[in-house]
Amino acid sequence: MDNSEGVTLGRLLLALDRTLATLVDAPRGLDLPVTSIALVDLDDVHYGLGRAGRAADLHLLLGLPDEVALDLLTGLAPHPPAAVLLKSPTARLVDAARRLGVAVIAIDPHARTERIYNLILRVLDTGPVAGESMRAGSTGDLFELAGALAQRTGGLVSIEDERSHVLAYSPAGDAADELRRLSILGREGPPRMLAWLRRWGVLDALRTSSEVISVDEHADLGLRPRRAIAIRTPGPGVGEFLGVVWLQQGREPLAADTDDALIGAASVAARVITRRRAAGTEHDDLVQRLLGVRGPVVDVDYLAGQLGLDAAASSVVVAFGMPTAVARAPESVATQVAALTLHASAFSPRSVTTIVDDRAYVIAPGAEAEAAVGWARGTVAATERQFGIRVRAVVAGPGPGLAQLPGLRGQADRVLDAAGHQHGLIDDVTTIEASRTGVLLGEIVGLLADKPDLVDPRVVALADLDARTGSAFTESLRVYLDRFGDVAAAADELHVHPNTLRHRIRRLQALTGIDLDDPAARLVVALSLRAPRQDKTSATG
């Protein structure tokens, strides 16, 4: 992610707060500008960070062994990042970072790394402090709003969305109670605490009322007194529920006009969230129009300008295909976008992303196909590791100019739609060029599946014999043909003696009448073997 204005390292630390992050060392001070961040895990190190990742001001290290992290830092010289963030940095890494002039920020071991990444993106997205105050009716950053409300009331503020995910908060110091601390570390309300708030009727009251709600102190649960108010869409009546502004009492009593301040803060927060949602919808519309999802592209220059892209730039399209059951699950769209594009900013600084049904598309200006394949492979692996979801990716391009994007997207869709994936003919991460054979062969196999009468009956009979007797003629024949008649290589794959395989081949030819010396017969048999198992056909024949 890149922000042309950015913030200073000191302001970033202030936003993260001591609950989440602790400065270990800053050899060049805290006034360094920070405009971009790269999330780096083992897949990124293995497949390469790319130019944008290497140039990022912040590197958030995810699960890297000490030796790997040290090698990464050394490799980034002579242009090291401003800071690295990681859990439990060792003295050896801190010493190495100090010699390179890199600040080290320790992340609480219990914090969720992907949420930290998204939090830092929000901080960077705000740019320098605008100087607008809450009293002036600013609709700027939620962190600024939380800070202003905390200063006015003397309390500790956190702002959550409708699913209790923390969007922003004020600096906490040592006065934060257990609910606030766990919410910040986990980036969402901890289930045990939410259960108590639900039992007391607090959450129901917030969802159905626009009034300020008070919550008494519960020392046995580690909860200090707090107040809260729902964030609702502007307008007459009770608007749509968007989230909650929470205000925890610190070591001193809250200000006398705290309720009035909360009401005003909720109104400002509603405008910020509504504006951001509208911007996100507009962004998706622009990207989808550029990809040709919404029909023919009329004005590439206009769309590119709105997205901050160069219309003449060479670009690749990376299309991700997700299991339909996952794509249609509640809240899956936001989850898929976050998971699949988490590393995109470290790969291409101006990448843009959208999701359409069960497909996610990333446009990466200036990227090469080989680098895009490496990034896609790392993203697919990370998605499976973190969420247990196996997605597929196709890299199309690069194409000369953004006007080529609809064609590239169409090619990628054809590969994702191809039957070859079902039959193991297309790799989970591939390019248009590498998948051509698998796509065509998959379509032929699909035709055979739809019209089983086109399948060689001798192959059907052989499969039926295997099913009745437990023989292995079908598998032996498939491997033999795949190895172009190389008995030694095929026998090695089948884990049998070459003489055993020779005997099977002679025997099945005698049983079926297949002439494997005939090129046409080999082609028909090989295609028939690729078709789905013939159990149904043989059972009814």
Image (cartoon, rainbow, N blue to C red):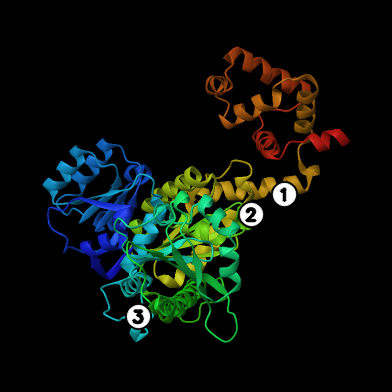
Report the front residue among 145 and 88: 145
- Name the spot of residue 340 as percent of width and height, x first: 47, 55
From the viewer's perspective, is residue 451 above or below residue 217? above
For discs 1 and 2, the disc positioned in front in the rendered view: 2
User: What is the three-letter code of the residue carrying label 2?
Assistant: Thr
Q: Which residue is mark 1?
A: 447
Give the residue at x 55% y 85%.
Answer: 235
How many angstroms separate mark 3 from mark 2 (CA)? Answer: 44 Å
Q: Which residue is mark 3?
A: 134
Query: Is residue 245 found left or right of 11 in the rendered image?
Result: right
Report the front residue among 158 and 358: 158
For discs 1 and 3, the disc positioned in front in the rendered view: 3
- Name the spot of residue 156 as percent of width and height, x first: 36, 65
Ranked by sequence position, the earlier of labels 3 and 2 is 3
Mark 2 surroundings: few (<14), some (14-19) or many (≥20) residues within 10 A: few
From the viewer's perspective, is residue 497 above or below residue 526? above
| Residue with the most extreme right position | 540
User: What is the three-letter code of the residue carrying label 1?
Assistant: Leu
Query: Is residue 96 found left or right of 513 in the rendered image?
Result: left
**Quadrant location of the C terminus?**
top right
Q: Which residue is mark 2?
A: 324
From the viewer's perspective, is residue 122 above or below residue 180? below
- Name the spot of residue 494 as percent of width and height, x first: 59, 22
Q: Secondary structure at mark 3?
A: helix
Q: Secondary structure at mark 2?
A: helix
- Name the spot of residue 275 as percent of width and height, x first: 46, 78
Q: Secondary structure at mark 1?
A: helix
Ranked by sequence position, the earlier of labels 1 and 2 is 2
Would you say residue 29 is visible in this rendering? Answer: yes
Residue 14 falls in which quadrant of the image?
A: bottom left
